[in-house]
Amino acid sequence: MQQQLAHVALVVRDYDEAIHFYTRQLGFTLVADTPLGGEKRWVLVAPPGRPGGSALLLARADGPEQLSRVGDQTGGRVFLFLTTDDFWRDYRAFAARGVRFLEAPREEAYATVVVFADLYGNRWDLLQPKPAGVAQPG
């Protein structure tokens, strides 16, 4: 049996502003932007360099209840974890593109890590995992 987490739905206020943030500020690739009828679209963005990996499904909020969740899908906890092979390269690139960091970078037992916010305030970890054999949190 083989399984893979394909997509994670992220509730957004507007497709185009979300596409702009993820592609311009984070450097993600726009994988799909397919009209589904009415004003609905199937919008996928993914980090560069991971063909066939997981992607974010940008899902425009439908109604007041979903709109109230934009930017706070996890009650203020870190929601998504973006790993990198070069923390400082990506940290500097994000900072140069105006990404808002919520703390200073730090060294943990498992990774070099920093928390940043997306355009809606969802919290992300940017992290470069330590080499294999180093203790992971648990």
Image (tube, rainbow, N blue to C red):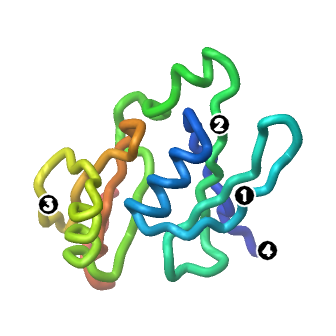
Q: What amino acid type should be assigned to the residue bearing mark 2?
A: Arg
Q: Mark 1: which amino acid?
A: Asp
Where residue 47 appears, as percent x and y from the top left, is 50, 70
Calculate the distance from the C-alpha at mark 2 to the C-alpha at mark 1: 12 Å
The kind of secondary structure element at disc 1 is strand
**Image coords of residue 48 (percent x, y):** 50, 76
Q: Which dot, 3 or 4, sits closer to the camera?
A: 3
Q: Name the residue that disc number 4 marks.
A: 1
Q: Which mark is residue 105?
A: 3
Q: For mark 1, what is the residue?
A: 33
Q: Nearer the viewer, mark 3 or mark 2?
A: 2
Q: Residue at x 35, y 75 (%)?
A: 84
Q: Picture coordinates of residue 31 (x, y %)?
A: 66, 68
Which residue does the image show at 41% across and 37% down from the upper left? 120
Task: Indicate the secondary structure of the residue bearing disc 3.
Answer: loop
Answer above or below: position of 122 versus 34: above
Q: Are marks 3 and 2 in contact (CB under 8 Å)?
A: no
Label 2, label 4: how many angstroms apart (C-alpha)? Answer: 33 Å
**Secondary structure state at the residue bearing disc 2:** strand
Amino acid type of the residue tagged 4 in the rendering: Met
Residue occupied by mark 2 = 60
Do residues under tags 2 and 1 come within 8 Å of each other at their CB atoms? no
Using the rendered image of the protein, determine whether residue 133 is visible from the camera's viewpoint.
no
- Contact? badges 2 and 4 (CB < 8 Å): no
Q: Amino acid at mark 3?
A: Pro
Q: Is residue 10 left or right of residue 135?
A: right
In the rendered image, residue 67, in percent from the top left (x then y), is placed at: 57, 23
